[in-house]
Image (cartoon, rainbow, N blue to C red):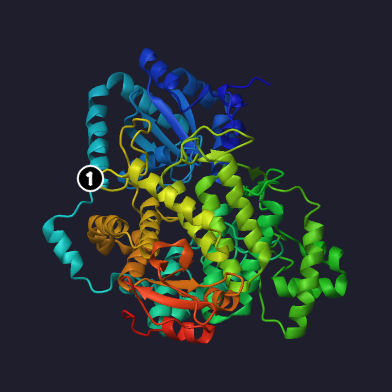
Amino acid sequence: MMTNRLATETSPYLRQHAENPVDWYPWCEEAFRRARDDDKPVLLSVGYATCHWCHVMAHESFENPRIAGLMNDRFISIKVDRQERPDLDDIYQKVPQMMGQGGGWPLTVFLTPQGEPFYGGTYFPPDDRYGRPGLARVLLSLSEAWTHRREALRDTIEQFQQGFRQLDDTVLSREDAEEAAEVQDLPAQTALALARNTDPTHGGLGGAPKFPNASAYDLVLRICQRTHEPALLDALERTLDGMAAGGIHDQLGGGFARYSVDERWAVPHFEKMLYDNGQLVTLYANAYRLTGKQAWRRVFEGTIAYIVRDMTHPDGGFYAGEDADSEGEEGRFYVWTAPEVKAVLGESEGALACRAYGVTEGGNFEPGRSVLQRAVTLTPLEEARLEGWRERLLAARAQRVRPGRDDNILAGWNGLMIQGLCAAYQATGNPAHLAAARRAASFIQDKLTMPDGGVYRYWKDGTVKVPGFLEDYAFLANALIDLYESCFDRRYLDRAAELVALIIDNFWDDGLYFTPNDGEPLIHRPRAPHDGAWPSGISASVFSFLRLHELSGEDRYRDLAEHEFQRYRAAASAAPAGFVHFLAAADFAQRGAFGIILAGDKAAAAALVESVHRTYLPARVLAFAEDVPVGQGRLPVDGRPAAYVCRHRACSAPVTSGEALLERCAGVTVSPQ
C-alpha cells in the first residue's frame, strides 16, 4: 500500500495516518510554502494516538477516497499530534471556542497560507449527520468561499486575530485589581462552590460526560485540611468513592479512563491517559494521608501497579496513554459477559463475581456486555474472596488483544506521574514507589535533557526533536522537589532550581508564556493560563517559585509568583473553575507556607521524616539543613536529629519527636529564637 509523508514521522498518531489517501504534511514550512505557491487554504487536523473520535473521523473521512480527493484537490492538509505540539493545539483550539462551540479532538481548523484561521470545528462526519455539517460539504463550501469570496473571509480572519488578543489580554486595570483584591479567601470560596456543585449522589462535577477534575478536588482537599469544613470532605468522599466504584476505574487492572459517558462514572470512554492517572494517584494518596481511608490506598496502589506493569518503558520512563479500541471495537478489551466470567471462575463463584461487579445478562454497555463496576456492598468475607476473583479475571483478560498504546514519553506528563509516585511513597513508605519515581527521573535526565540543560518535549524510540514548553519545565521542577522531599538526594533539588532558572530565562517576558522566547514564530504567542485536564504551566510554575522561595529565602521567587497573582487575580475571581490549580498555589502562599528543616544525620532522622511524610500538610516544604540556605545555623539537639518549623525567615525552637513536630505544624506560632 502507498504511504504519504507521515510514514517517516516518529509520532504514533501521525504514523496512524501514513496510509491515508490524503496527501498529508506534518507541520512544516514546506506545507505552508506550497499553500502559498498554489494559493490554497490549509486544512489543519489535530489529534492524538489514543483518541477514539480521531479514529472514527480517520476511518469515515480520511480513508474515504471521495473526501481525500476533495482535500487533495482544494487544500493543503497538515496533521499535528497535540502531544508533540501543545502550543499549536492551544492556539487553534480557541477557534471553535470563539465560534461558540466546545473544543476537543479531533480538531479541524481551516487556515490561510500564513496560518491564520477562518473556520473550525472538532469532529465532522463525512456527510451531514448528528446535526453536524458533513466534511464533504464543509470542504466544498470553504473552497468556494476561498475562490470567490476572499474579501469576506478577511473580515472573519481579522475577527479571530482580535479574539486571540483579547483572550490572553488578562493584565488588570487598577479598578479590576482593586475589585479582585477585595474578594476574601478566593481559594476557600472556590472550594466551597465546587463542593456545592458536586453531584449529591455520584460525586464529580456536571452531568454526562463526566471527567475526574483532579485539580478541582485537589483544591477541595487543601481547603478541607485547612478549614475542616464537613461539606468539603463530603464532596471529596462522594467523588473519590464514586470514581473508585465506577467503570471509569479499571476494576481488574487498575488505573482510570479519561472520562465516563454518563453522570454515574459507570461507562467510560475507555482510553487511559498518563496525565489523569498521575494526578489521581496524587489526589487519592493525599486524601488517604488526610483520612487514613484504606479503600483509597487500594485505589492508588492499584493505579500505580497498572502504570508500572503496562505503561513503563524498560528504562523507566512512562508512556503517554492507551487506546479505547482493540480489534476495531471501543472497549472490547475491558467488557465482559456473564458466561465469560463464569468460564473463568466457575458457575458458583462466577455468579457471585457477576453480582459484585454488576455483570448482567442484559449488559450495561451493549446488549449482553458489561463494564465492571462495584455494584453492591460486600461483606468482609466477600471482599476477601473478591481479590482472588480479580486476579483470575485479570489473568484471563491478559490473553485478549490489548488496545493500542501511545508510546510517546512526554517530559511534563512524566513529571505528573513522578509527583503521584512521591505522594504514594510518602503516604505508605513503600520503597517500590520511590524506586519507580527515581527511575523515571533518570530516564528524563538521560534521554530528554538538552545540552544546555533544557528539556525536550518528548522521546520516541530514541528521537527527540521538539523543545519543551513551559508545562514540561514546571511539572518536572515540582516533581523533582517532591523527589528531593522523599529521599533527600540533593541532586534533585539542584536540578529543580536549574529548571526554574531556565523558566525565568526562557519563558518570562513581563509574565510567563507557554512557548520559549526563541520559539517558532506563530500567529499568536499563547500564555495559556487556564487549568484544564492538567494544570497550566503558569500555575505549576508559580508553585515551583513559591516552594523554592521557602527553601532558599530568595525574594525574587516570591516576587515572580506575586506578579502572576496580580496578572490573573481578576480572571480567577471571574471564572475560578478555570484557575483551580492557580488558586491552590494562591492558598499555599496566603495560608502561610512554612518549611520543616531537619538537622542531623539523615538516616537517624527517619522517625521525624516519617511523621511528616505520613501526614497531609499541603502548605509545607521539607529539607535537611545542609541542603538549603534557610537551614543555616540549624543544628541537632544533644546529638539527636531535630526539626525546626520556619516561616518568614524565622524558626521555632527545635523539637526531636514526631509527635511534637506535628503539634508544632498544627498551629504553634512561629517566632524568632
Residue 568's image quarter? bottom left
In the rendered image, the quadrant that contains the N terminus is top right
In the rendered image, the quadrant that contains the C terminus is bottom left
Q: Residue 133 at x, y = what percent?
A: 42, 38
**In percent of the image, x 16 and y 65: which residue is there?**
179
Is 170 placed above or below 523 here? below
Is 493 placed above or below 149 here? below
Q: Residue 40 at x, y = what percent?
A: 38, 19
Q: Relative to 584, is 241 on the left or the right?
A: right
Query: On the image, numbered disc 1 is attached to which residue?
Result: 166
Is 494 placed above or below 110 here? below
Q: Residue furthest top?
A: 37
The local secondary structure at tag 1 comes to helix
Q: How many marks?
A: 1
**In percent of the image, x 46 and y 40: which residue is there?**
454
Q: Residue 227 at x, y = what percent?
A: 37, 82
Q: Relative to 229, is 295 on the left or the right?
A: right
- Comparing 271 with 372, the one in front is 271
